[in-house]
Image (cartoon, rainbow, N blue to C red):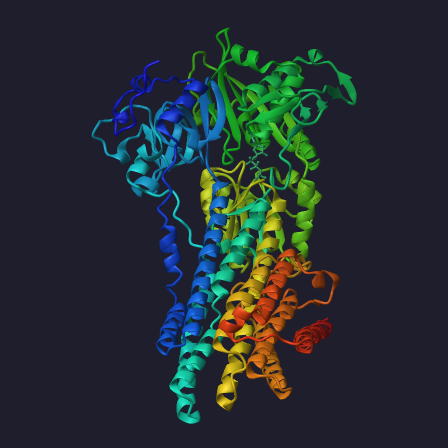
């Protein structure tokens, strides 16, 4: 073979197909596997260099860019100037620790998201050594033959060699969002990119039709790589809630600095303290009040939530979706493959004369035929062979046997038809040779049929048609009955369709028409002009997924309504809906009915209809809009390129990871790795859990800061000794608060999460209840810290000892408060509650160990002024923690009783 030319700006668009193939040393059957591997080594992966990320040093330094850190650095400088070297060193140490924690957590969160993004790496359909196969797009090499279908993202720069109504949207490259029609003919060498109709550029989207192209450039050598466009922007770890909280933390910092200044002035002017003392006190106050760990904790909570969702097959593409998921009130789901298993089997074949029942399940071509419950031989029914032939040849699916298991390549509906043909004794390869296909109109949900043009070796040319029965019926004039073409008995067929659909089966019809010999092209208009002969109806079963039935019930308990939107027949849809627990088994709305409604009528209709049949992607968009107009928060699934607008419009667009097109995935906020409805329910559950955990982290941290700062302000205002020194507060905030709060990021789902109604959109995270709780707990912390400090002094302890008691009380209260906050409203005194989780126990033991060190290690005493405590002091410390937990349990009980009373009154 010739060596292919180097990847460089070569005028591929100006050469004809033959020349291109020759220069790339390839052929229509594709490259051989070894050749492809060799080229991969030579040209490298088909990948764009990831966007430049700042280096570790920059990211580390960025951690210091923060108002709090500036305050602390200033404090360190002033304490150093005053000659308090130890204080200064500790403050610097804490600054460093804070930067390190921020650096590692940020890195961890980003890594988690990156790994998840990696799960969505695109695939490409290629022909290699004459076989169609799907490979990771990264492995494409120049010379590969790539097959494109609507919804695909073009995986490399391709010189097109075959097109069928191929239209591509090149906005990624040219900014033009109107799709352009593609062709095979070469164009002028100097034609600008937008006019090179015979090239499909990497990163652009196929919006319609099909095509085949040869890879001419990959990775950085593609046009997209050359202009340095990024396929995907790096997403910040940020959501509306995190932004609000970060802004809140900043405002709080400024307010606290203001308050610290006032306290500073007050201490000097009204109480006559020295400037140095008051400066230390003001720094203590600032440090105590600012919730420094909060933004990092929230980010990590979110990242962990996203990771958990990914583990349960819901891959988040846009982070705000995590929050929105908790508010979803309606889930609109596709049926096939999402609610059902998408393992189709033909169960019955209905002809004008009789019904054949088909045995066997799955794609294995094993099973016979029965008529009126009696086994029959196919040879006795020649019409069955003709029907099986249409099923086999008007079809793109392939069944392969691998280790005794039959695997499908292609669409399950078509796979079932291939299996049927094999059961009838047809050999796919032989049939394709005897009646070669010369042209195709592929199946699209919009027109609901597929047609193929064939000729045989006796000079006949004919069209095979299969599709939704009412569609096919409308194109037929005659029916095949007892070997002859007779006038169509519409009434008969309608009855049989209804009957098959009522059994919950998907119905397809097969038809045939002879055309003039030698015909090589099949146009839409040829099919639309009708004149077909109806051969048969197929009834296919597609059982509901067991886990989907349960998931629908769980969604209902969680106040979420599930609606099914399907391309299937209304009667089939209703029957399957009933099996799944969707809809009332009576009401359905079809796409056609939906079209005849104006927006106001539709808004009413969507309120009590849950099953939508014969619906196309445009209908999905109208449904989302109607539901949103009723103030619903809508999650909508989709897979095709035309679903993209509905996915974008929905509050949470959900694309199918397996059967979904790249176009749908790109429009979606979340991708289901397993295409399973149950994963949506899991994602909602995890979404609600993340929100709960964010609330818990906030409710945990804020009152600790509140309690600490109240203690300091009270001390300064009343002129008594500070119960905790500034350095000790730094220690507590940086070590125990952050460590304990981090455990909340790993909190498991509360048992009642899917029994609560969805969270109203726009509900402030700091609800009245949380504000009250923060105020109450701040007051309790104040009482605990101050009380224990004064109690120790009163019992003859030194100031240092009293400080140590106060610090340990503070930490003990934090630990017990952590157990309380894990269940915001329900009791914490349960087996589960007391047992904790591994992260909670790890955090508690670490903090306990560190407090022992703080209290008893001499070098800690040197730094922090701590002193060893007696056993009775230790017992006192723990008792205060327990008391806090008990008080909060009583408070929770009172809230619950109030809520039940209210419910009672409302009832
Ligand atoms: P859902 O919307 O529930 O996921 P679906 O998207 O599979 O269902 P469509 O694929 O739009 O629904 O199918 C609609 C109808 O088109 C089917 O009821 C069937 O009659 C017909 N049909 C489905 N697949 C094919 C095919 N490959 N060839 C011809 N007709 C088909």
Residue at image location 56% in from the left, 13% down from the top: 429
Image quarter (top left, top right, bottom left or bottom right) of the N terminus: top left
Compared to 268, does 649 lie above or below?
above
Q: How many marks?
A: 0
Image quarter for ligand 1:
top right
**In the image, residue 180 lies at what x, y percent?**
33, 35
**Camera-nearest residue between 272 and 881:** 272
**In the image, residue 727 lies at what x, y percent?**
48, 74
Compared to 583, does 867 lie above or below?
below
Q: Residue furthest top?
A: 458
Compared to 200, does 373 lie above or below?
above
**In the image, residue 364 lies at what x, y percent?**
66, 22
Q: Residue furthest left?
A: 190
**Camera-nearest residue between 764 and 835:** 835
Q: Confirm whether residue 583 shows in the render.
A: no
Q: Confirm whether residue 291 shows in the render.
A: yes
Q: Residue furthest right?
A: 374
Q: Is residue 208 left or right of residue 810?
A: left
**In the image, residue 763 lies at what x, y percent?**
54, 67
Q: Is residue 322 left or right of residue 749?
A: left
**Camera-nearest residue between 545 and 773:** 773
Image quarter (top left, top right, bottom left or bottom right) of the C terminus: bottom right
Residue at image location 39% in from the left, 72% down from the top: 76
Compared to 233, does 662 lie above or below?
above
């Amino acid at each position: 073979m010739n060596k292919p030319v180097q990847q460089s700006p070569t005028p591929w668009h100006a050469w004809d197909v033959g020349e291109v193939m020759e220069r790339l040393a390839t052929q229509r059957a594709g490259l051989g596997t070894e050749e492809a591997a060799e080229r991969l080594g030579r040209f490298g992966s088909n990948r764009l260099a990831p966007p430049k990320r700042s280096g570790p040093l920059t990211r580390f330094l960025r951690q210091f860019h923060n108002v709090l850190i500036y305050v602390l650095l200033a404090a360190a400088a002033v304490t150093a100037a005053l000659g308090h070297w130890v204080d200064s060193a500790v403050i610097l140490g804490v600054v460093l620790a804070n930067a390190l924690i921020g650096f590692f957590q940020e890195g961890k969160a980003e890594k988690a998201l990156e790994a998840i993004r990696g799960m969505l790496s695109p695939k490409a359909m290629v022909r290699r050594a004459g076989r169609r196969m799907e490979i990771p797009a990264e492995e494409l090499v120049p010379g590969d033959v790539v097959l494109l279908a609507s919804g695909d993202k073009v995986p490399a720069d391709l010189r097109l060699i075959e097109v069928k109504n191929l239209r591509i949207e090149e906005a990624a490259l040219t900014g033009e969002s109107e799709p352009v029609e593609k062709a095979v003919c070469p164009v002028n060498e100097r034609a600008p990119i937008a006019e090179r109709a015979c090239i499909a550029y990497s990163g652009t989207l196929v919006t319609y039709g099909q095509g085949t192209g040869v890879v001419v450039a990959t990775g950085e050598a593609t046009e997209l790589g050359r202009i340095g466009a990024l396929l995907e922007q790096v997403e910040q770890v940020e959501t509306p809630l995190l932004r609000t909280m970060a802004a809140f933390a900043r405002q709080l910092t400024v307010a606290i600095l203001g308050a610290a200044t006032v306290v500073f002035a007050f201490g000097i002017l009204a109480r006559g303290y020295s400037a140095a003392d008051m400066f230390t006190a003001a720094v203590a106050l600032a440090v105590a009040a600012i919730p420094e760990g909060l933004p990092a904790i929230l980010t990590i909570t979110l990242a962990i939530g996203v990771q958990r969702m990914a583990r349960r097959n819901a891959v988040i593409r846009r982070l705000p979706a995590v929050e929105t998921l908790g508010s979803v009130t309606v889930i609109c789901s596709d049926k096939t493959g999402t609610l059902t298993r998408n393992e189709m089997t033909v169960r019955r074949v209905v002809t004008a004369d009789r019904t054949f029942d088909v045995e066997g399940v799955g794609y294995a071509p094993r099973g016979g035929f029965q008529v009126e419950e009696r086994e029959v031989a196919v040879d006795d029914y020649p019409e069955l062979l003709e029907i099986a032939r249409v099923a086999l040849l008007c079809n793109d699916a392939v069944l392969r046997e691998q280790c005794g298991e039959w695997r499908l390549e292609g669409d399950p509906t078509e796979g079932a038809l291939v299996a049927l043909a094999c059961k009838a004794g047809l050999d796919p390869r032989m049939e394709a040779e005897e009646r070669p296909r010369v042209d195709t109109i592929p199946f699209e949900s919009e027109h609901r049929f597929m047609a193929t043009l064939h000729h045989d070796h006796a000079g006949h040319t004919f069209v095979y048609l299969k599709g939704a029965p009412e569609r096919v019926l409308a194109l037929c004039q005659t029916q095949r009955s007892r070997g002859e073409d007779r006038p169509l008995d519409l009434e008969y067929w309608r009855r049989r369709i209804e009957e098959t659909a009522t059994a919950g089966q998907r119905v397809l019809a097969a038809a045939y028409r002879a055309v003039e010999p030698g015909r090589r092209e099949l146009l839409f208009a040829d099919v639309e002009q009708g004149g077909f002969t109806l051969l048969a109806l197929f009834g296919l079963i597609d059982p509901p997924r067991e886990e989907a039935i349960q998931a629908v019930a769980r969604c209902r308990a969680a106040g979420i309504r599930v609606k099914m939107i399907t391309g299937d027949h209304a009667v089939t849809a209703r029957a399957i809906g009933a099996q799944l627990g969707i809809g009332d088994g009576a009401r359905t709305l079809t796409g056609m009915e939906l079209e005849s409604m104006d927006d106001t009528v539709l808004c009413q209709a969507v309120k009590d209809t849950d099953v939508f049949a014969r619906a196309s992607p445009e209908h999905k968009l109208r449904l989302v809009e109607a539901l949103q107009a009723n103030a619903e928060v809508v999650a909508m699934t989709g897979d095709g390129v035309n679903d993209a607008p509905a996915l974008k419009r929905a509050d949470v667009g959900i694309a199918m990871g397996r059967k979904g097109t790249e176009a749908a995935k790109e429009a979606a906020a979340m991708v289901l790795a397993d295409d399973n409805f149950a994963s949506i329910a899991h994602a909602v559950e995890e979404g609600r859990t993340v929100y709960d955990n964010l609330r818990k982290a906030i409710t945990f941290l804020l009152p600790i800061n509140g309690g600490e700062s109240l203690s300091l302000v009270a001390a300064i205002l009343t002129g008594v000794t500070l119960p905790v020194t500034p350095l000790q507060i730094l220690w507590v905030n940086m070590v125990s608060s952050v460590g304990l709060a981090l455990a909340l990021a790993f909190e498991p789902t509360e048992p009642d999460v899917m029994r609560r109604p969805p969270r109203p959109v726009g509900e402030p995270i700091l609800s009245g209840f949380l504000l009250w709780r923060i105020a109450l707990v701040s007051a309790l912390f104040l009482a605990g810290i101050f009380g224990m400090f004064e109690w120790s002094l009163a019992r003859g302890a030194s100031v240092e000892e009293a400080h140590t008691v106060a610090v340990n009380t503070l930490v003990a209260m934090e630990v017990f408060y952590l157990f309380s906050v894990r269940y915001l409203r329900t009791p914490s005194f349960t087996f589960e509650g007391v047992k904790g989780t591994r992260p909670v126990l790890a955090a508690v033991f670490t903090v306990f160990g560190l407090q022992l060190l703080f209290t008893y290690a001499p070098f800690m005493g040197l730094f922090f002024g701590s002193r060893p405590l007696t056993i009775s002091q230790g017992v006192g410390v723990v008792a205060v923690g327990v008391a806090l937990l008990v008080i909060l349990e009583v408070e929770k009980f009172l809230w619950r009783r109030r809520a039940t009373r209210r419910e009672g009154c409302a009832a």
